[in-house]
Structure formats: C-alpha cells, structure tokens
Amino acid sequence: MKNKDSIGLIKYWRPIVGVIGLAVVLVWTSGACTQKVKPGKADAEIGFAVPGNAETIEISVKPLSTRIYVVGTTASEEKINISARIPAYVKEVFINAGDTVQKGQNMITLDDRDILKQVAAAEAHSQHADSEYKRARELFDKNATTQQALTAAESMAQAAKAQLEQAKIMLTYAQINAPIDGIVTDRRIEAGDIANPGMPLLAVYDPSRVRLEVPVPVRLIDRLSLGQKVDVELERPARVFKAQITEIVSEVDPATRTQLVKAKLDVGSGEVLPGVFGRLWVKEEPRDAFVAPKSAVYTSGQLEMVQVVKEGRVIRRLVKTGPAYGDSVEILSGLKEGDLILAKPKLEN
C-alpha cells in the first residue's frame, strides 16, 4: 500500500519539479542573476585612447549642393548619309570606314557607260538642232520661211541643249564625292553592287563638332536652359569635358517621360568619337545633410566605418555613406550632430 502511495506522489511532483527547473533556466539565461550594465557605459570601456596628434572633426548639418547625372550618347552635330542619285553598278570604292576625307574627294565611282552613251546622243541631237536653227534663221532673213518655222526651230535647239546639259549633270552623278571634311562611317557598299537612288552607301561625319544627346526626365528639365554650361563625363576618353546646351526638345516622350537635350562638347577634332556613353551632370536644390571627409571613412570587409571619439576613447562606428563630392562624402546614417570623429582613422593591428 505504501509503495502505491509513493509512486503516486512521484507522479504528482514530477511535472511540478520540471516546471520549476525550466523557470530557473529561463531566469538565468535572461540575465536576471547577473550584474546589470547600464546602456552607454560600455563605449568608455572599449576602443583605445585618442592619439595625441589626432585631428578630430565635429559632425554638423550643412547645406549640400548635390548633383545627379543623366546618361546619353555622343553624336556628331553634322553627319551626312551618302546615297546614289542614279541607278548603276558600283565600279570602284576608294575609301573604308574610319578614313579621313576632304570635301570634294572622290569616294565612289559608278558605272557610267550608259550615261556616256546618253551624253553622246544628246550632243549629236543638239548639234543637229543648232544646224536646223541656223538654216531657219538664214531662210527667214531671206524671207524664205515664216516666223512660226523660225520659232519652232529655235525651240527645238533650246530643248536639245537642255537635254545635253541634263545628260552631263547625270554624268557627274557617277562620281560620288565627300560633301564635307570628315571621317567615313557606316560603309555598306562594295564594287559590283547595284546602287539605287536613296539607298544608303556610307556616311561622313564632322569630328570637330560633337555633342551629347541625353533624354532628361521632365522633373529635371527646369534645371537646364539654352546656353547653360554643364559638365559631361565620358567613358572614352575617361574624363570630364565642358559642354554647352544647344537644344532642348520641347516634345515629351510619353513612354519615358523625358525630353531630349543636346549639349555641344568643347573638344578638339577627333578627340571624341560618336556613339560613346556619357553622363550629363545636373545640379539639384541644396539640402541639409551630414558630410564627412572621405579620409575619415574606411572599410572593414564590406562594412563602412568611422572612428568616433567619446569620453577620451576611440570606438568604431558603422555608417552608411551616400554620394561623394570632391574630398567629402555624405553620411546617410550612423552619425548624429555633435559627434566627433577622427579625420584619419588609426587602424589597429
């Protein structure tokens, strides 16, 4: 009987003991049995002493004139697409893409045999018409023909002469010459091909007149104006050029909500090629921000850090930076007004 009572007591107390044990573990792990450390006291106990020659900077709110960029592509201000004016086989091509040409230089010769035949026929017809007109004039002077006959002969002579001039003009179309001093691009023709009127054969652009064409969001258009000087950063050559806005297209692209802006680059002939990626920098309205020297920010792995001076000690502080402006960088988070930081961090070994 006693054994049964003992077993019953054990079954009764076992869950109670388990609950009490779990409670003790929770209290211990929560730190209730350890000494409390007040927030803000740990900073003074870590880090290292401020170096004697350390330069410190106090963080404060400053008006920041920021810039953002919009991307575009360079293009020549003068690019001429060359096409044939008569249908003919291509006889010779004297240039390649990238070649420099002078105005009037022969680039392509078309087969002119048919045109030469037309010129010869027109010359013969013109000579015959002139002879008929002279004969009619002589007869008219002798009262041997009428005024009407003389007028008809004169008209035929003039028409034949016009046909000859037109044939000679057609002959000049067989020589395709450079319209400007420039560089050849987009060559699409070879000897033996057929050139038809309107079909593009090649293009010539002026390398001394290059601009950046940029689709600018409408929200930024008011920051730009005709004649305004702007900075343009190119991918090749990799540097910043001065430019002047020469055109702002008034029409808004409904798909992109942008307006096309053209800025002429201040460059030498051939210094910048068409088709190069570029950035046009646009100033934004000034705003308040925290700014620190670039030299004060360093990286630890993928983290950005500064060294804050607090109560005579230097501690590390995680920050998040924004755009850089010259020797300064915007601090988006991690610092507050009045914080002291080292201008040049002392990295621990």
Image: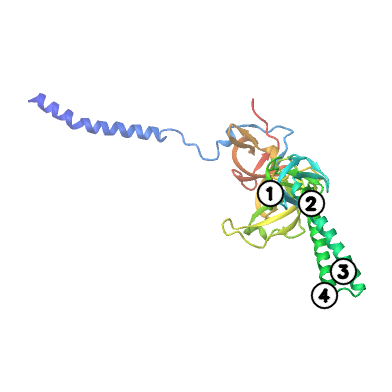
In this rendering, is residue 87 above or below 99? Answer: below
Figure quadrant of residue 150: bottom right
Q: Looking at the picture, how far across and down is residue 268, in whole percent?
A: 82, 45
Taking 335 as reference, is 142 left or right? right
Residue at position x 66%, y 30% in the image: 347
What's the distance in space between the residues labelled 2 and 1, CA to CA?
Answer: 20 Å
In-front residue for pair 39/156: 156
Q: Earlier in the sequence, mark 1 or mark 4?
A: 4
Q: Looking at the picture, how far across and down is residue 95, in whole percent?
A: 77, 40
Q: Looking at the picture, how far across and down is residue 143, in whole percent?
A: 90, 75
What's the distance in space between the residues labelled 4 and 3, CA to CA?
Answer: 10 Å
Taking 338 as reference, is 231 left or right? right
What's the distance in space between the residues labelled 3 and 2, CA to CA?
Answer: 32 Å
Q: Secondary structure at mark 3?
A: helix
Q: Secondary structure at mark 2?
A: helix
In this rendering, is residue 53 above or below 133? Answer: above
Label 3: which residue? 136
Q: Nearer the viewer, mark 3 or mark 2?
A: 3
Figure quadrant of residue 304: top right
Q: Nearer the viewer, mark 2 or mark 1?
A: 2
Residue 55 visible? The answer is: yes
The circle on residue 148 is 4
